[in-house]
Amino acid sequence: MSWKETAEPVLSRMPNVARPEGHVPFRRKLGWTAGVLVLYFFLTNVTIYGLGGGSDAFGQFRSILAGQQGSILQLGIGPIVTASIVLQLLGGANLLGLDTNDPRDQVLYQGLQKLLVVVMVCLTGLPMVFAGGFLTPDASVAQSLGIGVGGLQWLMFAQIFVGGLLILFMDEVISKWGVGSGIGLFIIAGISQRLIGGFFAVPGITGNRGFFVSWYDIIVGNTQLGPVLGAQGLQSLLLEQGQILFLFTTVLIFVVVVYAESVRVEIPLSHARVKGARGRFPVKLIYASVLPMILVRALQANVQFLGRILNAQLGESMPAWLGVYQVTETGATPVDGLFYYLAPIYSYQDWMWFAGFAGNNEWYQVLARLSVDLTFMIIGGAIFAVFWVETTGMGPESTAKQIQNSGMQIPGFRQSPGVIEKVLERYIPQVTVIGGALVGALAVLANLLGTIGQVSGTGLLLTVSITYKLYEEIAEEQLMEMHPMMRQMFGG
């Protein structure tokens, strides 16, 4: 008996959001999307009952993992992304034996993904409450409830667990009834909120000074830059007060991503039965989208999360070669050892040793850390892009079948999925690897220079690309709404 037959009774009965039986009108899709987005913002402001304090377990990764520190969405999309990593690795090694084109295997795959998400919610949430000191219970609340600190910790974990399940089903509602994907929407929501704050934040309200407020203070003389041609004045103008470098990086990433999204190889198509009906299949430079980059960063986040747990448990007895930690505003941060070199570059403060940043680390240590981060992002981006394309039905074989089923063919070639697949194999595998590596390099570059609002470079990269794709999907939905016959051609 195979594992599929053993697990089918459980996996096939996992709770799920019902698919719409027919076409969902565009306005209704927008309504579902807006409703889930409002619910998401509401839940990020619901504080965990009984929480006394603590530090953010994800640190600088918080911006791309969505959620909110101290809320019931503490875990954000982390468990969903981690489950996807596990499934992609198992699928890439062909250990699952599932055919995603088979309806029965599709049900098993979706059930297995949900089960893994539940497991990851537990594996991530339990150490946050019980092991790492990231979520400290309030002893006075425990006393008032009469359940003790241990009982209050279980109550806090229950709230985190419910939040993890809620974000899972919110993502599923968006995917089936809304526009785009829930994961992408939550990332856009969190990053956009921080980006707007980076431009317009007022110190008396938020505690931070936004870009426009900083320049207002400079113009009216409230902030003194010093000699602009001097090292201190130039540093203040570019980084600390003027934030010119952050603005440059933000605009540069926006322009580069939009340009990269528009670079494509278009394969001409014609309808086999409708004379004169023609189209094009675009193979974009960023063919696998930037979503695989979430998987790479989530893998790094889990490694750093493990390091923080070990540091919290072992303390000073932790071997120096494994990691030396220093307490900062974002919690314990590695400053030496293996976990230091595996930590990504978050901002200019992590590598500009010549400007007095990067702590007490030598230049060669910083260079080694930068090299590891760049190598990991480029190679990891390429590998996960390949896995993403194969597991989401974007590979040459699956795409060829979709084109064939829509009644289209490549002019001058025989109408056969095998023939179309051979043509697509000339472009898709190479473009997937190049695009994945390019996105990884861009993410590191953005982190090196810093961005407005202190959002991570990866977060900004994801936001721009996801927003661009959301715009394209909305345009496609409007086109199919105006011309219902187009739905059959697009497989809707």
Image: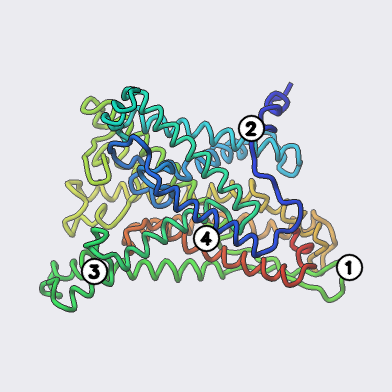
Residue name at image x 30 percent, y 55 percent: 347
**Colouring style:** rainbow
The answer for how far apart the CA atoms under marks 4 and 3 are is: 29 Å
The answer to whether 364 appears left or right of 253 in the picture is left
Can residue 225 be spotted in the picture? no
Task: Find residue 462 and report its horizontal and vertical position in percent.
Answer: 47, 58
- The residue type indicated by label 3 comes to Leu
Mark 4 or mark 3, earlier in chain: 3
- The residue type indicated by label 1 comes to Arg
The residue identified by callout 4 is 466
Residue name at image x 68 percent, y 32 percent: 13
Q: How many numbered badges does the structure rendering display?
A: 4
User: In front here: 331 or 406?
Assistant: 331
User: In front here: 374 or 3?
Assistant: 3
The residue identified by callout 3 is 238
* Quadrant showing the C terminus: bottom right
The residue identified by callout 2 is 95
The answer for how far apart the CA atoms under marks 1 and 3 are is: 61 Å
Give the label on residue 273, or none.
Answer: 1
